[in-house]
């Protein structure tokens, strides 16, 4: 009689985190005050992979140096180089994740070169990575972005471009995770396309919450504008907005969000 090996599929912990640029004059919430809390949060939560938004070069380097066991990939959105500008960084845990390749494209009519799209106020980009879970060998695409805060067309067309580009490099139809600050709430028309093709972790998780991801430092304008979308996974076991105190009142003007995908 042959014995069949039981393959236990692992669950991947995904995080999306807008760190708030280090160049902003935020007084008591300056990056130099908050940065140890970001490291503590990541080391405490132990996500397998993180999509970072608004990460400047110094922030990327600080997190890379202090988050033991993690590697970073990504370039800045201004000129596509590793320096001087906001990065769409992917941070991944080397004990559980292996990267087979990655790239960056711009949300515009010329995605291969640094450029500003449509009615956007800034150049926007997306970073993708082909990842493998070392624990069970499963392969998936991780995509991280930050949609424009002004341009309505820039959000909707940018998001459509992300889906089109990822489909083009994913002929094997691997599972896909999309993280980011979308700069709009779930009811905005810009998200119609993504809602019909991918699942929102917050809404589909077995255990979830309804905490605002954008906290506005406790002021007006708070709302849910950060998302983790996925397809090709069987379910989302839990979704969390991370509000734990890591030594400062606010780790950023956005709370990190995390999801466990099976």
Image: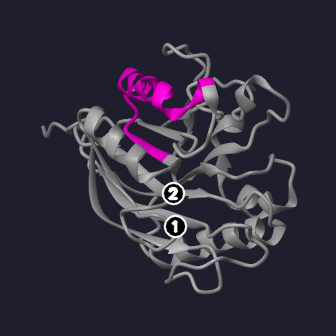
When the figure is inspected, residue 75 is found, relative to residue 246, above or below; the finding is below
Check if residue 98 falls in the magenta segment: no
Q: Is residue 239 visible?
A: no
Q: Is residue 150 left or right of residue 162?
A: right
Q: Mark 2: give few (<14), some (14-19) or many (20+) Cα within 10 Å.
A: many
Tell me the SS state at disc 2: loop
Front residue of this view, candidates 49 and 203: 49
Q: Is residue 119 left or right of residue 126?
A: right
Dots 2, 1 in contact, CB < 8 A: yes
Residue at 38% of width from left, 62% of height from top? 83
The image shows residue 164 at horizontal and vertical percentages of: 60, 76
Residue at 49% of width from left, 25% of height from top? 33
Residue at 76% of width from left, 38% of height from top? 224
Q: Is residue 86 left or right of residue 191?
A: left
Q: Is residue 235 left or right of residue 150?
A: left
The image shows residue 143 at horizontal and vertical percentages of: 50, 58
Total of numbered circles in the picture? 2
Which mark is drawn over residue 86?
2
Front residue of this view, candidates 56 and 126: 56
- For disc 1, the marked residue is 77
Structural distance between the alpha carbons of marks 2 and 1:
6 Å
Farthest-out residue, bottom: 110
């Amino acid at each position: 009689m042959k014995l069949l090996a039981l393959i236990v599929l692992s669950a991947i912990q995904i995080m999306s985190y807008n760190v708030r640029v280090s160049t902003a004059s935020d007084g008591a919430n300056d990056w130099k005050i908050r940065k140890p809390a970001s490291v503590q949060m990541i080391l405490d939560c132990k996500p397998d992979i993180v999509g970072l938004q608004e990460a400047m070069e110094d922030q990327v380097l600080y997190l890379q140096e202090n988050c033991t066991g993690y590697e970073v990939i990504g370039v800045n959105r201004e000129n596509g180089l590793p320096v001087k500008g906001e990065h769409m960084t992917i941070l991944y845990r080397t004990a559980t994740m292996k990267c087979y390749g990655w790239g960056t494209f711009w949300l515009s009519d010329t995605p291969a070169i640094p450029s500003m799209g449509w009615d956007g106020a800034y150049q926007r980009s997306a970073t993708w990575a082909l990842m493998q879970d070392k624990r069970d060998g499963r392969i998936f695409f991780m995509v991280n972005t930050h949609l424009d805060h002004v341009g309505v067309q820039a959000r909707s067309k940018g998001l459509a471009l992300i889906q089109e580009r990822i489909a083009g490099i994913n002929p094997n139809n691997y599972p896909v995770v999309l993280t980011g600050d979308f700069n709009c709430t779930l009811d905005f028309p810009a998200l119609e396309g993504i809602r019909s093709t991918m699942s929102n972790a917050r809404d589909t998780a077995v255990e979830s919450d309804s905490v605002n991801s954008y906290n506005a430092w406790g002021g007006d304008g708070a709302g849910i504008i950060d998302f983790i979308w996925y397809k090709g996974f069987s379910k989302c076991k839990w979704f969390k907005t991370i509000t734990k105190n890591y030594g400062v009142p606010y780790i950023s003007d956005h709370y990190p969000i995390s999801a466990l995908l099976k």
